[in-house]
Amino acid sequence: MTVLARTVEATRRYGAVVALDRVSLDIRAGELVGLLGPNGAGKSTLINLFVGLRRPSSGTVELLGGSPADPVVRRGIGVTPQETGLPEVLRVGEIVDLVSAHFPGATGKAELLDRFGLGDLVKRQIGGLSGGQKRRVAVALAFVGNPRLVFLDEPTTGLDVEARRSLWDGVKAYHESGGTVLLTSHYLEEIEALAERVVVVGQGRVLADDTVRAVRDMVGVRRVSLVADRLPEPAGPAGLPALPGLISCEREGDRFHLLTSDSDELVVELVRSGVPFSGLEIRPSSLEDAFLTITAKESVHV
Amino acid sequence: MSSLVMAHTRHQVLEQIRVPIGLLASSLFPAISMLAFAVPFVGDDPLASTISTGSMTLVGAMSATLMGLSITVAQDREQPWDPYLRTLPAGPLPRFAGRILTTTAVMLVSMVPVLLIAALFTEAAVTPLRLLLGVGAVLVSSLPFMLIGLVLGFLLPSKAAIGVSQVLFFPFAIVGGLMLPLEVMPELVRTISSFVPSRGAGELVWWASAGVEPDVLPLVTMAVWTVAAGAVAAWAYRRDEGRRYS
């Protein structure tokens, strides 16, 4: 498959801070890649390298067979602006016109706005739109130039469920017609709904790069919390209580929060140990928990 | 390329027109000063009225460039819209050119009320040729103020740019002899006057519009300011680019 975007051993420093540390990544034609990571993990830096806003301190970045710094190369990509930055006093149609002026093969304005359910808003000023409407305008702008590759940074943050699903449909339709997508999100659910491949970044490095299923299995942890005076005595190598699959243990007042890869066995073992407890809760892991898991595994492997 | 410059200019002119405070600031202040100072005191003297008219158009031009340009450039740098535009297939040039063209348009618009007041309420007299020369002289002599505005815009956050540009604007206008005739000012101010760029700008505009023989020193000073501000603006631009886009 053709590689549309690629970094080879790309490192980016800001002064003494290493934002990206020797990252090598290929985005192939037709892929829908989800980029996951907490704030400060290096997601934005990676995207800024791909779209030509920043240059790597070392290593190389390639976009559509050329350099992201070359404006002609960037005709093939689409990027979402942050909706907070859209010029408040301009009308939706005027902003689309401005962006269209940069692309020789731009989509028609009416068709584009209809595709994102914005047809009625063409004459409205940005300042008068709701947060969700601004978000949709921002996402629509990424598709103005009929791109081969789009970078969608947090496309549905702040949208209600219905708007989120309709936007997902738009992204899926683009992908099915042959488009390639690199998507960042805080929502694991969003990545699961859209992406085929997930790249997890943390501390400037790629921690995992696999199919959605594989990464989900990898982070298939649950959060067990309970009220107790004490837990079974530590026995594991990291001084953790002797419970099955335990990844981390935090105490908050009289409540313990346990991350485990096997919640069923953990509860069985807890009951067997005879330690008195109450207020048992078991929840699926959040994305944050998933991170803890992946980064914990990472440090074990290193 | 030029169609892109036009697209960006159109976009920025629309922003100016829809939030007309910048436009009003550049037009109203010189117009009000004209009504308050020039009309009652020198309105029946053709030469003094013409000179005052030239001075007030320059005050409007300084407001559009020194204040307007510095603030909009500083604000642009703070908006996430700026980096977004940099991901589009174009370099920074079309937007920058649009900024300069828009500022020039604001400057030309700000001259209109002053010229109307001069025509209606004073004895100011000017031939069409002198009028054109005068407008041209205002455009030429706005160059150092545009460059100083760019320096401030590239170096300062927008709130600081608002303050610093005002701190420069009023002394430039007064010491340059644009608000009051230099003859009524103390000796010291008259000496300093030759070394501010606004005085040279005034000399050029008075010469072009009213045929007053200019002093040479202020013109030389203005040229020096222009070259120096241009060099600093180029440095400030590269520094800003390096910080945000390298």
Image (cartoon, coloured by chain):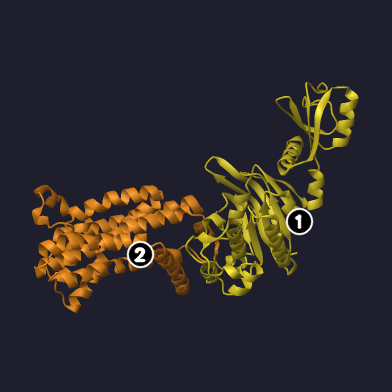
In this view, A278 is above or below A182: above
Q: Are marks 2 and 1 in contact (CB under 8 Å)?
A: no
Separation (CA) of disc 2 from disc 1: 48 Å
Residue position for label 1: A193
The quadrant in which residue A246 appears is: top right
Q: Position of residue A12 (x, y in %)?
A: 58, 47
Q: Position of residue A258 (x, y in %)?
A: 78, 32
Q: How many marks?
A: 2
Q: Does the image show residue B81?
A: yes
In the image: residue A20, left or right of residue B117:
right
Residue position for label 2: B103
Label 2 sits on a secondary structure element that is helix
Q: Does the image show residue B86?
A: no
Foreground residue among A107 and B14:
B14
Query: Chain A rendered in what hue?
Result: yellow
Residue visible at 23% across and 67% down in the picture: B114
Foreground residue among B137 and A107:
A107
Residue visible at 22% across and 51% down in the picture: B171
Label 1 sits on a secondary structure element that is helix
Query: Chain B rendered in what hue?
Result: orange
Q: Position of residue B150 (x, y in %)?
A: 36, 56
Residue visible at 81% across and 27% down in the picture: A278
The quadrant in which residue A263 appears is: top right
In the image: residue A133, left or right of residue B213:
right
Which kind of residue does numbered mark 2 sit on? Thr
Chain at tag 1: A
Q: Position of residue A102 (x, y in %)?
A: 53, 70
Which kind of residue does numbered mark 1 sit on? Ala
Q: Which mark is residue B123?
A: none
- Residue pushed farthest bottom? B128
The quadrant in which residue A64 appears is: bottom right
In the image: residue A274, left or right of residue B135:
right
